[in-house]
Image (cartoon, grey):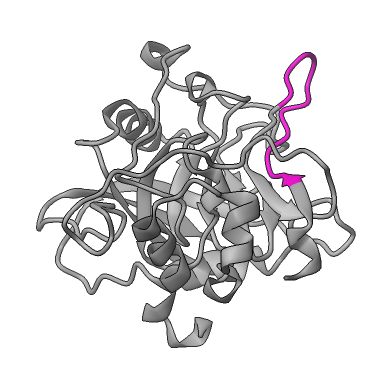
């Protein structure tokens, strides 16, 4: 087990004034806070993935989100409005209004996640649209934090979701051992463990953050961004990573690549 699996590290920091974004913990040695360990029991279902729908392909003409990252390419995301209607409406409304355009990925942690969506560019800002202020967008057992999952950052509860979001890029499948689960996600179902063991992710975040989407193309772009982690330990990219635009488009039948195994460059 690697050094960074020994304790938890904050991935969100809303530190302006009285705000303190405690959330999205990464197994690491930079903090002793492990408050985001997942403890929910997943529902059993007939499928081998326990009814978990992260890898469901969009239907022709279904709305997807395309994040165009300057000098890198597009990250395309399937949304799950039937499962998480408020979360998806909040995200697509922001996108349609141009809220995310020209914002940066202000926090990146290699082998964990990339985070953006803060107009302050520091992790200290960002709001939901007006009708969702204070609304608990919740969680669902049908979506989890496998690699490529898209979720909202929060300030300790899913009722504090704003505009900041993250894309999961780790932990890797080979790290998903029985010892790992016993420490960081002891109450996962066997079906859910299997999904993580095959695909990797951050199971200790399940139940604490609102997952509402899944990367269906461009996971290699997310990994490229995650690799820009500043090695001085401040969890910021060493160069500016700009979202030139975040648009809502229609799925037109392009090849779905939602798992790490779909990318030969990431094997």
Quadrant of residue 34 in the image? Answer: top right
Q: Position of residue 162 (x, y in %)?
A: 51, 26
| Residue depicted at 49% across the width and 25% down the height | 158
Q: Position of residue 230 (x, y in %)?
A: 81, 61
Magenta range is: 9-20
User: What predominant SS class does the magenta segment belong to?
Assistant: loop
Q: Nearer the viewer, residue 184 or 139?
A: 184
Residue 169: within the magenta?
no
Q: Position of residue 68 (x, y in %)?
A: 45, 58
Classify residue 88 as left or right of residue 15: left
Q: Residue furthest right?
A: 232
| The N terminus: image quadrant | bottom right
Q: Does residue 238 appear in the picture of this structure? A: no
Classify residue 148 as left or right of residue 108: left
Q: Position of residue 32 (x, y in %)?
A: 82, 42
| Residue depicted at 77% across the width and 62% down the height | 4
Residue 17: within the magenta?
yes
Q: Nearer the viewer, residue 179 or 112?
A: 179
| Residue depicted at 26% across the width and 53% down the height | 53
Q: Nearer the viewer, residue 34 or 219?
A: 34
**Position of 151 relative to 234 (above/below):** above
Q: Does residue 193 appear in the picture of this structure? A: yes
**Position of 108 relative to 21 (above/below):** below
**Position of 3 relative to 101 (above/below):** below
């Amino acid at each position: 087990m690697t050094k960074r699996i020994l304790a938890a590290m904050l991935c969100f920091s809303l530190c302006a004034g009285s705000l303190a974004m405690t959330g999205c913990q990464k197994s690491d040695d930079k903090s002793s806070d492990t408050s985001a360990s997942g403890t929910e029991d997943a529902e059993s279902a007939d499928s081998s993935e326990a009814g978990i729908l992260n890898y469901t392909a969009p239907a022709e003409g279904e709305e997807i989100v395309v994040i165009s990252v300057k000098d890198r390419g597009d990250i395309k995301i399937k949304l799950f409005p039937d499962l998480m209607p408020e979360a998806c409406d909040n995200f697509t409304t922001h996108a349609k209004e141009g809220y995310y355009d020209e914002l940066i990925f202000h926090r990146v942690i290699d082998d964990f996640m990339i985070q953006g969506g803060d107009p302050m560019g520091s992790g200290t800002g960002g709001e939901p649209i007006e009708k969702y202020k204070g609304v608990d967008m919740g969680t669902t057992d049908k979506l989890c934090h496998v690699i490529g999952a898209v979720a909202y950052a929060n300030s300790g509860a899913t009722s504090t979701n704003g505009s900041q979001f993250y894309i999961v890029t780790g932990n890797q499948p080979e790290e998903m051992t029985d010892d790992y689960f016993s420490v960081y996600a002891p109450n996962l179902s066997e079906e859910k463990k299997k999904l993580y063991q095959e695909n990797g992710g951050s199971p200790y975040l399940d139940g604490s953050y609102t997952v509402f989407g899944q990367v269906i193309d461009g996971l290699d772009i997310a990994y490229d961004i995650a690799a820009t982690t500043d090695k001085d330990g401040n969890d910021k990219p060493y160069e500016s990573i700009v979202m030139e635009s975040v648009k809502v488009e229609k799925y037109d039948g392009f090849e779905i690549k939602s798992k790490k195994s779909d990318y030969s460059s990431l094997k």
